[in-house]
Amino acid sequence: MVDHGIREHATWSASSTARNVHCAGALTLAQFAPPDKESIHAARGTACHQIAEKCLTEGVDASAFLDTVEKTKAHEITIDEELVNSAQEYVDYCRQFMHPPVWYWIEERFSLGDLNPPFDAGGTGDFVTYDEATQTLEIVDLKNGMGVVDVKDNPQLRTYGLGALLHHQDLDVETVKVTIVQPRAPHKDGRIRSETFHVADLVAWTADLLKSMKRSKQAMDEYEAAGGNSVKLDAWAEKWLTPGKCTFCPAEGTCPALRKGAMDVAAVWFDDLDQPRIGNSALDTSPEALARDLDMIPMLEDWIKARRAYAHAQAETGVEIPGYQLSEKIGNRKWVDDPALAARLMAELGLDESAIYADPKLKSPAQMDKLLGAKRKDMIVPFVERPITGTNLVSVDKTSRPPAKTVAQKHFEPQQ
């Protein structure tokens, strides 16, 4: 099994293609970014991939891993129902291809070296399948995050398709299909969505990809030529940095263009004492202005989080930041690790066993899946529901669900 937690990425990885195509200078700044610190969200995504791979290679359902622990680069993730459900939806989709005459490969690494790119470039396809009857090569990508990912014209997925095509030059391929399985992100086209294109279209796109790689190489060369000159570096940033695809960029917390853009969004200016001030003009409260600001706010939020994370990482290495210090986080209370804890509590507190243990509760649906097994798990379907717990404000272009009723609409509904 591939060790998802520690595997290294190429300089130009498939997962960074969209960012590097959009922002030619991103690859340069990434060289100077601090070591990537795995977030809990990234760790959960890694854990989801790990149990999904085990399901496909061992022939079991994801529920078999409920309450087990998966180790990632920096975390130990207890597999919960959410991860089980995400992995299972991906596994169910892939399993339909895991029989003759369809060929398939699980966690297949590939390189773009045959194209002679200016950087080492490549990636890993989560699941690759080839149908000889239709001459179709399909790459399936599991995404556990909640940030909606569009499949159409997606540079990352097209890089996967290109890599799989180069890796399987012995196959007679006419069409390439790329598929996203994203169980936790509602989309107007569904949680599983695909794009299919002719090999000729992929070849044409490859020419554009190589042009983007050469632009990134030129940006890197010009950065080195600037030699640390601040004026030249400001000009370099203006020329080569293009915010907009900054999520997961290792240089997000240090990018000068993103900082300027975030300040512009917040209308920040500095007074004579170099103190930041927020613009004091009245905010436009029209729906159109709200839509405009909602589009811009994620950039500001992402930069704030990245900047805070970078400052924290610097402080942990010993850098003194004026006016700030590291402070220990105090967690919630928990019992000490003592095998004899229950006996000691009963003896010292004068309580019996029924007093210190909570009443048993009905097992969760995922736990029942595990108990019943793959052949009988559908028996609980009539007894399961997915309750509505509230609402989110989402873009109409990125959801397939009908609009929820407003408070006002509910208020004027006839009473039952």
Image: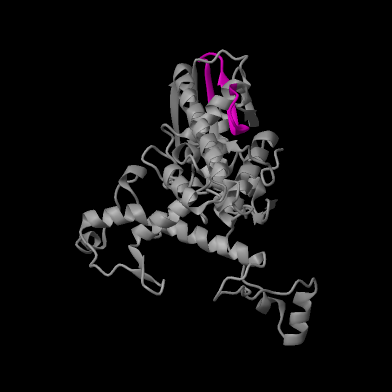
Q: Magenta stretch?
A: 115-139
Give coordinates of residue 400: x percent, y percent. 35, 42
Please say whether residue 97 is visible from this viewpoint.
no
For the N terminus, the image quarter is: top right
Residue 52 lies within the magenta run: no
Task: State whether residue 369 is above or below residue 150.
Answer: below
Please say whether residue 205 is visible from this viewpoint.
yes
Task: State whether residue 66 is above or below residue 93.
Answer: below
Task: State whether residue 338 is above or below residue 208.
Answer: below
Q: On the rendered structure, is 110 left or right of 272?
A: right
Residue 118 lies within the magenta run: yes
Q: Main secondary structure of the magenta part?
A: strand
The foreground one among 397 and 376 is: 397
Give coordinates of residue 6: x percent, y percent. 69, 45
Q: How many marks?
A: 0
Give coordinates of residue 48: x percent, y percent. 60, 46
